[in-house]
Image (cartoon, rainbow, N blue to C red):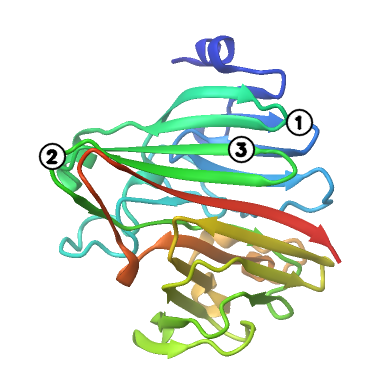
């Protein structure tokens, strides 16, 4: 559908479709509870801010690059149907193809509480079929208001079980990575990708003084980001997910990525974000039986402290 069709068929008083950076199409949502922007390429929630907060909760880099087939630095990239490098094919894209291909808007509505809901479905093409031949349908449902709910639904239309890895690679806005803490994973085991993939156990809250890239396994716990600089807590509550990834590139790695930008205080955009990703990876990849569906749901909220 072109923009005129999208707006006439699926637009709402709180939802409009526009052409934006890189010639991509975006859904812009503005209701009583919050504002958000979703790029139809990748079903990529670019940013979200509840009206009660002065600062966005979902962060996007000011230097993010937009264009056909490009992944956006920030927001909520959808990692599907695998997480990390492909198990056997090094040439396949890391974290799968879902975040760089077109998705189709299949529905929109205003809910009884005033939230705005948008439904999108991944549109397969020759490239995706070559990389993942299983008959699966991926759908994303974004519900925007004072909270942000994201449902990632995998339906197995094949005749045998299919295994998938997945994650919502969410970038969350913080005042400074040096003072933020992430709680909720105490006692959980994790794979430390910065330390050669060693298995370790978390003790207490996560603090940051260098690069962190950890896949916590066998955990369904809610995570909370304590942010003394912005004087708020961000809560990440999930179902259908048994892995949590926590990531910050820190200075050296971020400098090799041109799209992090200088940030608001010219200290590096990487200082103003932390990724707390809900997913199913490594030990927790999901086997979806033939004819059945798997849903991973995450609810993001923020409260002042």
Query: From the image, which quarter does the C terminus lie in?
Result: bottom right
Residue lying at 62% horizontally and 87% vertically, measured from the top left: 204
Residue at 42%, 84% in the rendered image: 194
**Quick one: 284 or 76, which is closer to the camera?**
284
Report the side of 160 relative to 169 (left or right): left
Tell me residue 133's x, y (percent).
Answer: 15, 42
The total of numbered circles placed on residues is 3
- Return the residue found at the far left: 159
Q: Which residue is mark 2?
A: 159
Q: Return the disc, 2 or 1, that comes first in the chain's sequence.
A: 1
Residue count near mark 2 (Cα–Cα under 10 Å), binned few <14, some 14–19, many ≥20:
few
Left or right for 38, reference 115: left
Q: Residue at x 75, y 61 (%)?
A: 264
Mark 2 or mark 1, which is nearer to you?
2
Q: Residue 166 at x, y = what percent? A: 37, 56
The residue beneath circle 3 is: 143
Q: Quadrant of residue 182?
A: bottom right
Q: Nearer the viewer, mark 3 or mark 2?
A: 2
Q: Is residue 266 above or below residue 200?
A: above
Q: Is residue 127 above or below residue 279?
A: above
Give the image location of residue 230, x and y in percent: 82, 65
Check residue 31 in the rendering and tell me which mark sits there, or answer none: 1
Residue 60: image x %, image y %? 62, 52
Residue plotted at (20% across, 63% down): 90
Image position of 29 (left or right of 85): right
Labels 1, 3: front one: 3
Residue 204 numbered tag:
none
């Amino acid at each position: 559908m072109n923009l005129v069709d999208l707006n006439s068929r699926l637009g709402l008083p709180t939802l409009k479709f526009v052409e934006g950076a890189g010639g991509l199409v975006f859904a812009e949502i503005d209701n009583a509870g919050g504002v958000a922007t979703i790029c139809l390429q990748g079903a990529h929630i670019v940013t979200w801010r509840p009206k009660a907060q002065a600062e966005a909760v979902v962060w996007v880099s000011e230097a993010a690059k937009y264009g056909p087939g490009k992944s956006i630095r920030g927001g909520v990239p959808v990692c599907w149907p695998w997480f990390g490098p492909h198990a056997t094919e090094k040439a396949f894209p890391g974290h799968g193809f879902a975040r760089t291909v077109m998705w189709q808007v299949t529905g929109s509505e205003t809910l009884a509480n005033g939230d705005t809901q948008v439904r999108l479905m991944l549109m397969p093409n020759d490239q995706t079929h070559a990389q993942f031949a299983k008959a699966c349908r991926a759908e994303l449902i974004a519900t925007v208001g004072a909270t942000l709910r994201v449902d990632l639904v995998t339906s197995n239309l094949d005749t045998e079980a299919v295994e998938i890895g997945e994650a919502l690679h969410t970038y969350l806005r913080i005042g400074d990575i040096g003072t933020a803490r992430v709680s909720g994973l105490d006692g959980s085991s994790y794979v430390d990708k910065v330390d050669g993939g060693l298995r370790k156990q978390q003790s207490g809250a996560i603090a940051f003084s260098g690069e962190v890239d950890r896949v916590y396994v066998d955990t369904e716990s809610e995570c909370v980001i304590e942010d003394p600089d912005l004087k708020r807590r961000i809560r990440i509550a999930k179902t259908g997910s048994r892995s949590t990834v926590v990531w910050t590139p820190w200075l050296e790695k971020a400098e090799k990525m041109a799209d992090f930008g200088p940030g608001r205080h010219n200290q590096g955009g990487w200082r103003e974000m932390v990724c707390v990703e809900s997913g199913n990876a490594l030990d927790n990849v999901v086997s979806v039986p033939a004819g059945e569906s798997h849903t991973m749901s995450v609810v993001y909220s923020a409260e002042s402290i």
